Amino acid sequence: MKNESDDAREQDNLVDAASDIIETYRNLITVRIVENTSLGASISVLGILVLCVSAFVLLFSGLGMAWWIGNRLDNVQAGFFIVGGFYLILLIVILATANTVLIPAFRNLIIKKIYEQD
């Protein structure tokens, strides 16, 4: 027959096991939060770096293209206006497709990355 001290020990062991499980789960959540935060920060830094480099590439290639077109037309100002018009058309296309194509695509990509687990 079991006595009361055996029951008390079993209850203590059960409480200890439950507290260990809770502590382990808390540590797992903390590790996942740190992992996702560090991933988000590193992707943000990389995104900012790519954005800066892309802006310079776009700037200098646009200037070069405008100058080249201007020299071909013997009117440098016309070359700059042509390239500026091209960028304006590109901006209008991007803004027109933003709500239907771009925003949902980026949203789905972000959600997939958040819930992606290794």
Image (cartoon, helix red, strand yellow):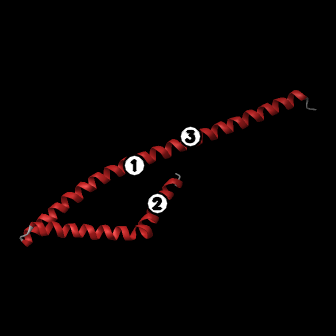
**Residue shown at the point (28%, 71%) measured from the top left:** 89
* Mark toward the start of the polypeptide (1 vs 3): 3
Q: Residues within 10 Å of mark 1 (few under 14, many from 20)?
A: few
Mark 1, residue position: 44
The foreground one among 70 and 29 is 70
Q: Quadrant of residue 27?
A: top right
Report if the CB atoms under discs 1 and 2 are less than 8 Å apart.
no
Mark 2, residue position: 109
Picture coordinates of residue 10, whole percent (x, y): 81, 33
Q: Is residue 88 above or below residue 1?
A: below
Say what secondary structure mark 1 lies in: helix
Picture coordinates of residue 7, whole percent (x, y): 86, 32
Report if the CB atoms under discs 2 and 3 are less than 8 Å apart.
no
| Mark carried by residue 98 | none
The foreground one among 52 and 86 is 86
Which quadrant holds the N terminus? top right
* Mark toward the start of the polypeptide (2 vs 3): 3
Q: Looking at numbered disc 2 in the image, what kind of residue is underneath it?
A: Leu
Say what secondary structure mark 2 lies in: helix
Mark 3, residue position: 30
Picture coordinates of residue 28, whole percent (x, y): 59, 41
Mark in the foreground, 1 or 3 = 1
Q: Looking at numbered disc 1 in the image, what kind of residue is underneath it?
A: Ser
Q: Is residue 87 above or below residue 52?
A: below
Taking 2 as reference, is 66 left or right?
Answer: left
**Residue shown at the point (36%, 49%) measured from the top left:** 46
Report if the CB atoms under discs 1 and 3 are less than 8 Å apart.
no
Q: Looking at numbered disc 3 in the image, what kind of residue is underneath it?
A: Thr
**Residue shown at the point (39%, 49%) measured from the top left:** 44
